[in-house]
Amino acid sequence: MFESLTERLGHTLKQLRGQARLTEDNIKDALREVRMALLEADVALPVVKDFIEQVRVRAVGTEVLQSLSPGQVLVKIVNDELIRIMGQANEDLDLSVRPPAVVLMAGLQGSGKTTSVAKLARWLKERKKKSVMVTSCDVYRPAAIDQLETLAKEVGVSFFPSKSSHKPVEIARAALEQASRNSIDVLLVDTAGRLHIDQQMMEEIKAIHAVIQPVETLFVVDSMTGQDAANTAKAFHDALDLTGVILTKTDGDARGGAALSIRHITGKPVKFLGIGEKTTALEPFYPERLASRILGMGDVVSLVEEVERTIDKTKAEKVARKLQKGKGLDLDDFRDQLRQMQNMGGLAGIMDKLPGMAQIPQAAKSQIMNDKELKKLEAIINSMTPHERGFPDVIRGSRKRRIAAGSGTQIQDVNRLLKQFTQMQKMMKKMSKGGLKNMMRGLKGRMPFPGG
């Protein structure tokens, strides 16, 4: 998300960073570029106007014009204003009620609502350690009920059954009673989607809302619709009081206009971002972290949290012990690393959070972030015998041909993997001799920061 906006803003602000002094004229030129970048990112016009005006007022004041590093201060102002329009901080779900806390999920058809119910159920279960029940009031699309039941089994939460012959209000009421009897912490109620907001839909969801009295009413909206997502959320909020928004398909939206527009237009916070199709692909919305990513400064905090959550501690300790004893890594270890990268959202998910990615040309970035390559590498390793994985030096001519045929790849692919593995071995040896400390010390002075 935000690739094009990051690129445009990065180019504009880089030109200002190097200038010894800023004037009202070059600030005006820069803000014209920023304005165009925001409009191209499909940010709503009222949001763009407000953003530019706030930056202009602060930028032409003494804060910037009399600063020793005016370009850096201006970057910080842009960063601060991005955070302001998206909301000052992450707004967590309010679950501080007598259980079950009821969360009502609403959205248009095709927005990824049912999948988001499963993602949120998993997030509550794994991150908040809550017992969760889900139910579907979408009696118009029987496939939605079946889909939610399948997803509930996948994420390991309770499912309250419903049928297309049942009334939505009665389903919701019965699910709430069952959740109370079973001492469930959180009940997630999925509702019917429509192709557009209509009166019938509103009346139905209002009736459900009145019966279950949800502590949270979340609107699920597709970020690919740009600023229309914000307008749809506002229309819905006008009819039914929302407490927050889940923005889906953000991994496929290079513009990001919806994320920047929703808070300003609806007054309601974005609480979560859907970042992929898997049930693990949901992350809390942190305005300050997203602003940092927009300005090309990465999101190291989220990356560290992701590593903490997904890395297999036992395997990591095994690798560390090997390195401490001076032993090299084998291809089984390499395969474990590839799998853990995929668990973290693949290379694209990792690199999106690294500082400086905006400076890498798009063609090179696409080559680096090709997650199909990870699966291909794993397939090649799977085609090897245990002996070959433990002693890669034995892999020569006829073995390479057999491995390539078994994994559906070419001999060149096998050669490339062995070369990458050799490079990783060398890097690991350096790290085991204190190289990691030296590497981090070298990086420290080059981490960009808005105020630095």
Image (cartoon, rainbow, N blue to C red):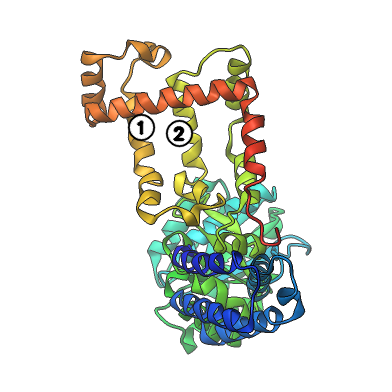
Of the residues shown, which amino acid type is indicated by label 1?
Leu
Q: In the displayed structure, does residue 284 sit left or right of residue 43? A: right
Please identify the quarter of the rendering in which residue 391 is found. Answer: top left
- Asked if labels 1 and 2 touch by Cβ distance under 8 angstroms, the answer is yes
Q: Which mark is residue 208?
A: none
The one nearer the camera, 442 or 203, is: 442
Residue 376: x and y in percent read 32, 35
Q: Earlier in the sequence, mark 2 or mark 1?
A: 2
Residue at image coords 64%, 61%: 187
| Mark pair 2, 1: CA separation | 8 Å
The kind of secondary structure element at disc 2 is helix
The one nearer the camera, 156 or 358, is: 358
Q: In this view of the protein, can residue 160 be seen by the observer?
A: no
The kind of secondary structure element at disc 1 is helix
The one nearer the camera, 444 or 270, is: 444
Residue at image coords 32%, 29%: 416
- Please give the residue where the numbered disc 1 appears in the rendered image: 377
Residue 192: x and y in percent read 47, 73
The one nearer the camera, 290 or 212, is: 290
Quarter of the image with the C terminus in it = bottom right
Residue at image coords 60%, 68%: 19
**Quick check: 183 above or below 43?**
above
Residue at image coords 66%, 63%: 288
Please identify the quarter of the rendering in which residue 17 is found. Answer: bottom right
Residue 6: x and y in percent read 50, 64
Circle 2: is it few (<14), some (14-19), or many (20+) Cα within 10 Å? some
- Please give the residue where the numbered disc 2 appears in the rendered image: 338
Residue 206: x and y in percent read 59, 82
